[in-house]
Image: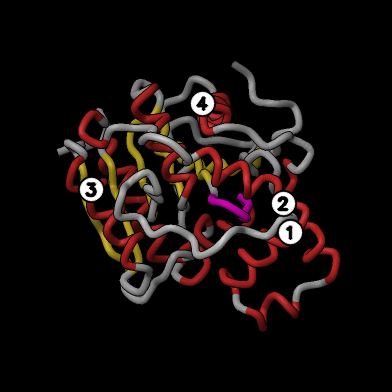
Amino acid sequence: MPAPPDLHVAEPAVADVAAPAVVIVHGAMDRGASFGRVTRHLDGLHVIRYDRRGYGRSAACAPGTLDDHVDDLLAVIDGRRVTVFGHSIGGVIALVAAERAPERVASVLAYEPPTPWEDWWPQPPGAPPEDPADEAEAFMRRAIGEHFWSRLPARTRADRRAEGVALRADIASLDGPAPFDPTHLPVPVLAASGSDTTWWHQRATREVADQAPLGEHRVVAGAEHAAHLTHPAATADLVRRAVERARNPA
């Protein structure tokens, strides 16, 4: 199945056919470009990034379900055998794709994949704002802080607020039973979290690593949820480890 025509995919024009391929799947209220600092540490790898539906340069794509995002990822993979690095909900997308198409997903790096279907996962306090744009702004204020939000150009703030519809679709896509079974994942899974992140992200990551037959757990010292922005070199080391696990699963 081809990717939607409005899905923005960034891939090097000239590829070393012998270089291992890595596809990066970003989380909610993010975009592929924010992984630029990480890719600068990934010489020798063929790194593919894309903006998921409703975000960044894929804003023209209508937000989709979890199945839609998995289909998009497999379309971006385009018949290759790759390592997938998924951040946050991107990690869930990567794990579902690995369970569905292990012949294409050779290994997964899942950084703090959320598991809101678990009964211990904390519920958000109160009802979300009625306007999805307000919800997107509240998300960004929590993610980057009031100071940095206020310093963003007005156009950037408006663009991020417009992504509230995609944010709500992301949240809705995880509402229901577990979309993958960690115990049935047939490929190496490197589940990673930051040492300074929330307890629920730490627990979710540890449980995925412990339950996956070929699971491994790593912690990025000093990092929170956005390790790709604050600790790009350490995040790149995780990517290289996931690529190595694809070569040597044991």
Q: Quadrant of the C terminus?
A: top left
Q: Quadrant of the N terminus?
A: top right
**What segment is highlighted magenta in the picture?**
27-32
Q: Disc 1 or disc 4, which is closer to the eye? A: 1
Instruction: Determine the secondary structure under disc 3.
Output: helix
Look at mark 1 in the image and give the residue it sits on: 160
Q: Earlier in the sequence, mark 2 or mark 3?
A: 2
Horizontal side, residue 234 vs residue 144: left or right: left
Name the residue rendered at 42%, 33% in the picture. Answer: 82
| Amino acid tagged 3 | Ala
- Give the Cα separation between the discs numbered 1 and 4: 26 Å
- Give the Cα separation between the discs numbered 4 and 3: 23 Å
Asked if the magenta segment contains residue 89, the reply would be: no
Look at mark 3 in the image and give the residue it sits on: 209
Look at mark 4 in the image and give the residue it sits on: 74
Look at mark 2 in the image and give the residue it sits on: 163
| Amino acid tagged 4 | Leu
Instruction: Determine the secondary structure under disc 4.
Output: helix
Q: Quadrant of residue 185?
A: top left
- Give the Cα separation between the discs numbered 1 and 3: 33 Å
| Amino acid tagged 1 | Arg
Q: Nearer the viewer, residue 18 or 147?
A: 147
Q: Earlier in the sequence, mark 2 or mark 4?
A: 4
Q: Position of residue 154 (x, y in %)?
A: 85, 70
Mark 1 Cα-neighbour bin, 10 Å: few <14, some 14–19, many ≥20? some
